[in-house]
Image: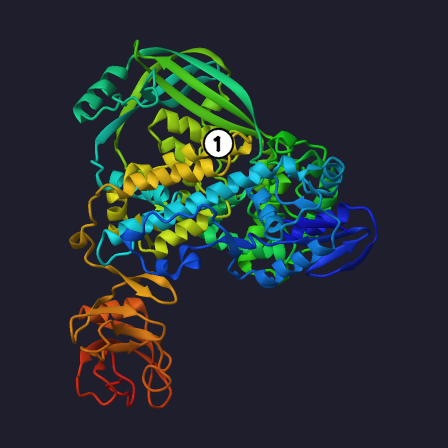
Amino acid sequence: MILVIAEKPSLGRDIADALPGTKTSSDRRYIKKGDYVITWVFGHMLSLKEPEDYDKKYKKWSAEQLPIYFSDWGHKIGKDSSGGFESKAARVKLIGELLAESDSVIHAGDPDEEGQLLIDELLQWFHYDKPVMRLDTGDTTRGGLIKALGKMKDNRECVNEGWSAYARSVADLMVGVNMSRFFTCANKSVLLTVGRVQTPTLGLVVARDMQIEGHIKTVYYDIYIDLDVETPDGIKRIRAKYQPKKKPKKGEEDNSQITDKAEAERIVKTLIGKSYKAEIERKMINEDPPLPFNLVKLQSYCSSHFGYNPKDVMDITQSLREKHKAITYNRSDCQYLSEEHFKEAPKTMERVIQNISYRPKELDMTIHSKCFNDKNITAHFAIIPTNNAVNLDKLTERERNVYLAVCKYYMTQFLPKAIKEKSKLTADVDAEHNLVAYSNKVINPGYLAIFKDIKREEPTVLSEITPGTYKAAGADGATEEKETKPPSRYTKATLNEDMTRIAKYVTDPKIKKLLELKDKDKKGENGSIGTSATRSSIIDGLVSKGYLEEKGKKLISTELGRELYRILPDEIKKADMTAEWWVIQEDIRAGKAGYEALTHNVLETIEKIIKNEYPSVDQTVMGNQYIRRHNKKEGVKQIEVLGKCPMCGGNVVEGAKGFGCMNWRPPKSCKFVIWKKHKAGLFKKQNFTKTMVKKWLTGKSVECKKLSSNDGREFAAEVTMRINPSGQYGPVEFDLHFKTEKPKQPDKTEK
């Protein structure tokens, strides 16, 4: 029996379809077909052991224990996640049983280092020593898989890819374990977590916020001149902009802005009444449709069009892929498709048309878009619709919106290019300046016909004038006051995008080049940190840890986040670490070094850092907003302080069922608590939240809209908190304040 182990269920099903033989059984565990048994995993089945898995003494964080390092960092069965699959322990047990029965294995992890490790670690876990062949392709169409199955190679030629990924995962854990403990132990009462990807991501937001908050507004003036152009059809008036002929080079300061209004008005006067020679040129532009989505591009699209954050889109696409079988692999970093996809496109498109009940007028399945390029396929390919029936009525509104967007960007690959006519007028003023005007006219909308959300640019009279040289005169002019603006605040979507191109913010030319080299074969990334599968969770983690906060859609660094970033050394807070690790990983991939080359290098960095002293976080700046607590089950946990206890002055924090004082244990035995839910009485339909408690602790009132009167009616009132040590139901009581006439017989006071 030949056992095929695929990286994900959908790939397992595709491989089964491409293998020879007759299918004899199929379920959620595996598929039998001829001499093959095809099974799959869902993410990493194994995870690296934590320090406390080796010795329980590491449960309590102590600077004296550092550095924590194990020469052979082993694995354990990973924690289960909500994915609708059986437990990881059950899946590992099944794979072990199938391996024992097999004569050989086909390793069908994704064709990248993480996909290599994902299956290799299972083979190592079970000490598998029989032949293993490697299925190495990013093209999971039936035709692509049949080709790849016919030219597999010995897995021993690929294992160094897996060792490179293992080295990186150990190195990441080493940084997280040692640096988080070191800086937490050095800073009283606050939990500080550090990570190779997390920390530079935080740095992007901190730097952007500092740039915005340090921005000094400068007022400047743009100058516009109305030119009367003498054409065979009469005088045509065209508004042109006064601008320098040479733009500043990248990195150079732009000194061309006119900041003196009187000077701007003086220039206008000199340009009016003057004669010019106007050159009009025109060219036709064939505009390609946008490429199909990868995950980051889809997340950005859904953020701007529907307001969904990246984690929302990840969950929605996961459901579309696994539950509805509506789209291909969703965590892709690639926007290209294979030639096999082009061959299969007519059938896929017909199914899509049936699913969404729409066929564009100019749809042409012979059009070969630039997205069809085997050379640009990475471990994955673009996110596109599948050739499966999809009932839109059975999708949620969010699923439908995302599915239709994926379909639209797939359809555009088979629509004509947009043909545009671009006109430009140029009139010399002097050696340094000229007057310029532009006009764009759509000749054939092509793919734009199905992009109703793209704002159309209306052509001006310039588009009506035949290209050539004309006499012109300055007829009128005006100045327009503008002001310099800082960059926009990050959102989750824009931060997600900038993680794919962090190299553009790196000033060290060597590091910048290394980051770009790392992604040289990835068309969707350019000097990146993180992966498509992890970036949204990293951003959400920065929010949940209190380093970033959301204000509407805006993402802003907190005082805690800024303080953490301020005290960290450059070795661990910049993207340099990712670049330097990549160089070592290249040697591991090439077999020039073992995985220890990276882990030893990281250990040296850690040892160097923990020997030095660093600034402490400024507790007065942070206002003691967060504290850390050791818990036997959860280890070290960071807790947000909601305010000071009005009874004893202790910290009030959120618990599972309520908000209470941390001094509840003897000797203080403080009884202050506000329960989240009430079974009866005034608040039986009104749950209490963290935001409400924060207001009450500062003496403010809170509007409650779901209060219950004695006769069962709902009503609203402003509610304030007060302390009554001898209260019948405890020391915390609430008073109601009505803006309008109160309902009949409400309880005035409730526990």
Q: Is residue 377 left or right of residue 196?
A: right
| Of 622 and 159, the residue lying toward us | 159
Q: Is residue 263 left or right of residue 683?
A: left
Which residue is drawn at the image coordinates 19% and 72% (left, top)? Answer: 645
* Quarter location, residue 620: bottom left
* Quarter location, residue 509: top left
Which residue is drawn at the image coordinates 53% and 45% (left, top)? Answer: 295
Q: Amino acid at mark 1?
A: Lys
* Quarter location, residue 513: top left
Farthest residue toward the right?
Answer: 22
Element under label 1?
A: helix
Q: Is residue 563 left or right of residue 388?
A: left
| Of 673 and 712, the residue lying toward us | 673
| Residue 43 against residue 488 in the figure, above or below | below
Q: Which residue corresponds to mark 1? A: 518
Q: Position of residue 548 (x, y in %)?
A: 32, 51
